[in-house]
Image: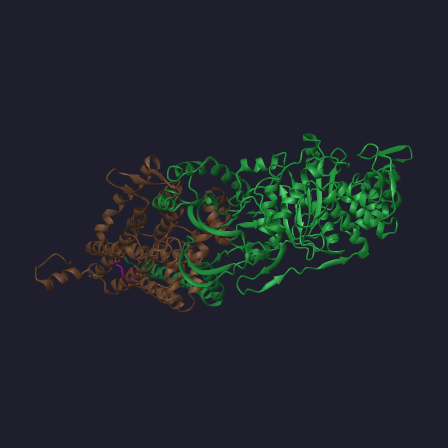
Amino acid sequence: MQLTNTPDDLGRFTRRLTIAGAFVLLCFGILFARFVWLQVIQHEYYRTRAEDNRIALVPIVPNRGLITDRNGVVLARNFSAYTLEIMPAKVAGSLDDAIESLAGVIDIQPKDRRRFKKLLEETRNLESLPIRTRLSDEEVARFIAQRYRFPGFDIKARLFRDYPNGAFGSHLLGYISRISDRDLEKIEQNEQEANYRGTNHFGKSGLEQHYEFDLHGITGFEQVEVDAGGRAVRLLARTPPTAGNNLKLTIDAKLQEVAEQAFGERRGSLVAIEPSTGGILALVSMPNFDPNLFVDGIAGQDWDELNNSPDKPMVNRALNGAYPPGSTFKPFMALAALTLGKRTPEQTISDPGFFKFGNHTFRDDKKGGHGLVDMYKSIVVSCDTYYYQLASDLGIDNIASFMGQLGLGQRTGIDIAGESEGVLPSQEWKKKRFKKPEQQKWFAGETISIGIGQGYNAYTPIQLAQATATLANNGVMFRPHLVQYVENAHTGEKRFIEPRPIRTLPLRQADINFIKHAMVGVNKEGTGARAFAGTPYQAAGKTGTAQVFSLKGGQYRASGLKKELRDHALFIAFAPADKPTIALAVLVENGGFGAQAAAPIARQVLDYYLLGKRANAAAPVDETAEEEEE
Amino acid sequence: MSGLNPSWHPRDLWRWLIAPIDGPLLLLAGLLVLVGLAMVGSASPERITNQLLNMVAALIVMRLVAQLPPQRLMHLAPPVYVIGIVLLIAVALFGDVSKGARRWLDLHVMRIQPSEMLKIAVPLMLAWYFQKREAQPRLRDYAVAAMILLVPTALIARQPDLGTAILVLAAGFYVIFLGGLPWKILAGLAAMGAAAAPLAWTLLHDYQRARILTLLDPEKDPLGKGFHIIQSTIAIGSGGVLGKGWGHGTQAQLEFIPERHTDFIFAVFSEELGLVGNALLLVLYALLIGRGLMIAANAPTLFARLLAGAITLIFFTYAFVNMGMVSGILPVVGVPLPFISYGGTALVTLFLGVGILMSIHKNRMLVQK
């Protein structure tokens, strides 16, 4: 070992050490300054961020409100079931492989896979999607035992919507299904984003859609302490959810069922209204569909079947089918004539079996005509010539303004969205409807067939039912509605959808009584007599037959046209005639004559409603019925 | 020298045992290790037994090394250095790739990471070299020293393991600096470094660049590359002046802090013990470093002085880089917090350094006689 520590060397080394020591202190000073910055000056900010990290708000989805009919029969309810859900982002490796190995643990049908694929395509955000719903306890146990093999898979307890009556009333109840982008927009517009955290479903049609924000309820929250993996460690606080409001309907579920059964395999619609309130007793659109199919996310095949069926089961014919009213229009025409002073009941015409206008001949259904016809007879036997003449005398604009007051060709304002307007033809309407000037002019000849409910005329069944109910209610018109009241499940507080008279038509009671009398005559001695033979109650009615080949407008009717060119059968009625408790309109697509196909359905519905008599079968078709109307 | 004359009497045995031990150094290092045990106990209680065993192993190594005279260490320097270089080359040729880097050598019996031993081997070798060239080192000597330093540094950087490369570079640089590197050269190097920075940037791997960018703006990628830094700064900041209390740090206990028993243990410490704890920790480190520098100042030979100074400054570098990265002022590199982070290798290496310091300290009188 050499001893060469010259003082010079040592001094330099000590200086260097001192510099290093100073550097150490400087660096530690910087660190300390950083700590002061983070822990004193920015402390509040970081404290908040740590709290945000630690505490998660876990939404608790409220029970969706129940829907019950006027007698308390449950039409829509909830049940809790286990679902197996996948967070695609958290699955290690290929999703298909993972599902494949899952199929070894619990039963996965091809249907489940298709539905999952569809959901996967539809959702953009990273949410958890069900691969299987309604697992049995045994399946849950089997999965839990093997859970470690399936990262990203989890069992969740979810509430499901259940429609215990299946397809009955599907069009009025509507259905709920997984929230779509469009639903999200609606949620945002209503500033409900926070309330819908955790909610997967949304009303898509019918009452479920219209009363969505009533039915949903208020989401509760659990404040939980979570770890970095998002697992809940400890419950800190809990705000319970408030169940959605219940809907009490004006619908009579039994009546609804009777009416739907009466249609059998036939397509069509029936709307029955309580004339004194506008409360809807039955709202039928056939064929119907099972809304339960949509709850878990509908399988592609089921959806295609429903959507591509030529019978269009997804269309709510009661609100969206616009049909020419045919001869059911005649009582309203007669009422217009009386009100406007164009006819008296006693005035008669002589019906040669046709009506000549210019050089065009409009034929009556009965060859050779009905002979001498007054107003009563014109309704009872459904004489066309009488109404050709009358329409010509009234003129299109008088007809349009009178029928407009009855609500025809206008949305009724029923508490279901997406109602169609129908067509109430007038000079004004034609100007708007057509682009070419030569088509915009109204020809007087076009007014003639309007008189018997043909031509441009097209009304929805609910409009016809409303007009009938207004007549039955002596001109006091109510907004048709399905919900009697919305009940707060928590407080029991009820919000009534008040029966609100829209208007009272300026009609003379004598005129009304006369029309009612003639409509009773229809069922006693006229076109409805066979269908209404032997009723212990007095029912007023009117048959109607609408020509299909002259239909205008709606797309789905055009496809029906190709399939079948038979006429649509219609019937309007109310009963008991002196103090009506029910008014209805029936339409059977391609059913033939109104007396043949529509009147027997009305009979079954009235029998059940007024007598409690249940047919439990499709209404008979009176093949021998002869219709003398067009 | 102690240990030459063992007797089996317990008192003699104890005397023999503590003879080469430097009390203040052991006290400071021991306090830091106890802090570490407490923090491992909070962050990852199941590991505390293991860490206790690591501590025992480290103390044994310290005691053994403390007994070695510095001359013996000096003789060991060239072979250790050469073996280290050979192993590094072997890694480059036959090493195992793990997480995209070739750092491990599989010797069938065990897997080793040779870059670890270079952290000691490089300063050892450089101190040896300066000792050999002690008469006024010339420019040529600095060039050779630079070669001794840069060859292993480059090999490690190529693996790539930038963190270790920088630590090795720093360790070697301390020796050269303390060895009297003229300020002119130092200034020249600094200027060159500044000029070459853009070039160095292009030579960096993508993930290395990402780390530096993350430091500048961690919120840009809060769930990805920025997650570590964001969560550790939240932990520190939310600790406040007094901390949340031992075992009560939510960031730590709810596992928001990654690597919370190893590289990021300081975030746990800081969250639970606050600014007061941080200040005490800095004081402990400062005292330890002060003691080390004192030992260096009093060392008898150039070799001993340079080695003691470099080892002490390595302790500082570990502490500064680790606390700097955890608190978000330095990029994330894999450097543990000395004496505190969980892990046997690091603890043994650190106490090996402590042992060397003790040996140098005990042998100061002997040589000066």
Q: Magenta stretch containing residue B297, yes or no?
A: yes
Asked if one can make out residue A207 in the rendered structure from this viewpoint, the answer is yes
* Residue A20, horizontal then vertical, whole percent: 38, 60
Q: Which residues are magenta?
A: B296-300
Q: Nearer the viewer, residue A622 or A11?
A: A622
Q: Kindly indicate the quadrant of the structure image that contains residue B316.
A: bottom left
Number of labels in the image equals 0
Q: Kindly indicate the quadrant of the structure image that contains residue A98.
A: top left
Q: Is residue A412 left or right of residue A313?
A: right
Q: Is residue A203 left or right of residue A454?
A: left
Asked if one can make out residue B329 in the rendered structure from this viewpoint, the answer is no
Q: Magenta stretch containing residue B71, yes or no?
A: no
Placement of the C terminus of chain A among the 4 image quadrants:
top right
Q: Which residue is drawn at the image coordinates 59% and 45% (left, top)?
A: A258
* Residue A515, horizontal then vertical, whole percent: 78, 50
Q: Nearer the viewer, residue A411 or A219?
A: A411
